[in-house]
Image (cartoon, helix red, strand yellow):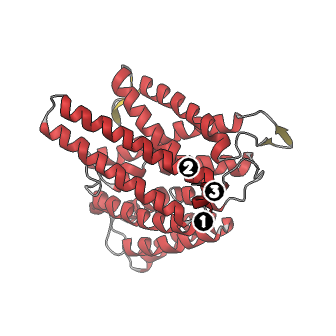
Amino acid sequence: MTALAQRLNLHPHVFWTLCLILLALAVGSALRLAGALWTPREDAKIKGQLASLRTWWVLTILMSAVVLGGRYCVVGLFVVVSLQALREFHGLVSTRIAAGLWPWAIVAVPIHYAIVASGALGPFWTFIPVWVLGVLLVRLVVGAQTRQFLETTGTVFLGLMLLVFLLSHAALVTTLPLVPETRAAGPLGLFVYLVLLTECNDIAQALWGRRWGRHPIMTTVSPHKTWEGFLLGAATTVCLSLLLGSYLTPLADAPLHVGQRQLQVPYLPAAISGVLIAIGGFFGDVTISAIKREVGVKDSGSLLPGQGGILDRIDSLTYTGPLFFYFVYIFCG
């Protein structure tokens, strides 16, 4: 198997992690199917669970294939994801946007991801927050579109920042030059680590919340979120981050750079990463929930059977991606 990983030009640790993810999904699928057969439930609920299971298989196989393809395949996938997320976002907020501005936002997406693929951080940090915003404003002013000026600009810019700029940090992780390289699985290892922890955090917070949740955190925005689910989910994510920290990343050995000082505490960067991903995943989820709640919908779309739309799947990554990227970039050298 290691020889196969080498022929695929993939670090063995990344390859084995993908194999373990597929194995875990197979075991979970078997348990879910057994539960559906032996536990009397409503047909609609069983169908929804089986649809969600099929979606997980599709997403996992797709993500594995993209990782096998390397950095440019990861960036290409995120181009598609951002475009679909913007499409769903537009469907939710279209009544708040004046005509003529949205195509300009769509054109910005492939340009932004071309910058991501190049790894040029200066243009990355300024393209959407500075230049695209300026173009959007000029487009409205030149077109004399004063109707819904503030709402249109703010809504479109929110979509671009949240679903393109913030989300793209997850792909930008694959461009990081890692120091030290020892015990690291390369930039793709960081990417798999981020995505795996983000998704596991979502699942853990939901499962613990359903089992032990008693005290809601935000009853208005997301009434099903509880302190018990959040804290137990965060603990699960930190444990997983410590387990994988030395296997996929250099975070088990890397010193923390704080000003002119270096703190060499084994596994501390991995633990902090787990905490950041747990917190970021929570706020990414409730941010998209707030948008959906304002427009009065439960799911952002129906592209993913049993799970809703793309927005419902990538919501946590809009926060975990930037938090993880800047933590590694700034504090881990």
For the residues labelled 2 and 3, say whether their Cβ atoms are less than 8 Å apart.
Answer: no
Circles 3 and 1, Cβ within 8 Å, touching? The answer is: no
Q: Earlier in the sequence, mark 1 or mark 2?
A: 1
Residue 115 location, x and y as percent? 60, 71
- In whole angstroms, how far apart are the C-alphas of marks 2 and 3? 9 Å
In front of the other: 244 or 304: 244
The quarter of the picture where the N terminus appears is: bottom right
Q: Secondary structure at mark 2?
A: helix
Q: Decide if residue 303 is in sight here.
A: yes
Q: Is residue 158 visible?
A: no
Does 139 appear above or below 21?
A: below
Q: Amino acid at mark 1?
A: Arg
Judged from this view, the residue extending furthest toward the left is 43
Residue at the (37%, 53%) spot, across then down: 311
Q: Which mark is residue 16?
A: 2
Mark carried by residue 7: 1
Identify residue type, mark 2: Trp
Quadrant of the rendered structure where residue 122 is?
Answer: bottom right
User: Horizontal and vertical percent for residue 30?
Assistant: 31, 39
Q: In the figure, is residue 78 to the left or right of 186?
A: left
Q: Amino acid at mark 3?
A: His
Q: Tag 1: Cα neighbours inside 10 Å, few (<14), some, or many (≥20)?
A: few
Q: Nearer the viewer, residue 203 or 91?
A: 203
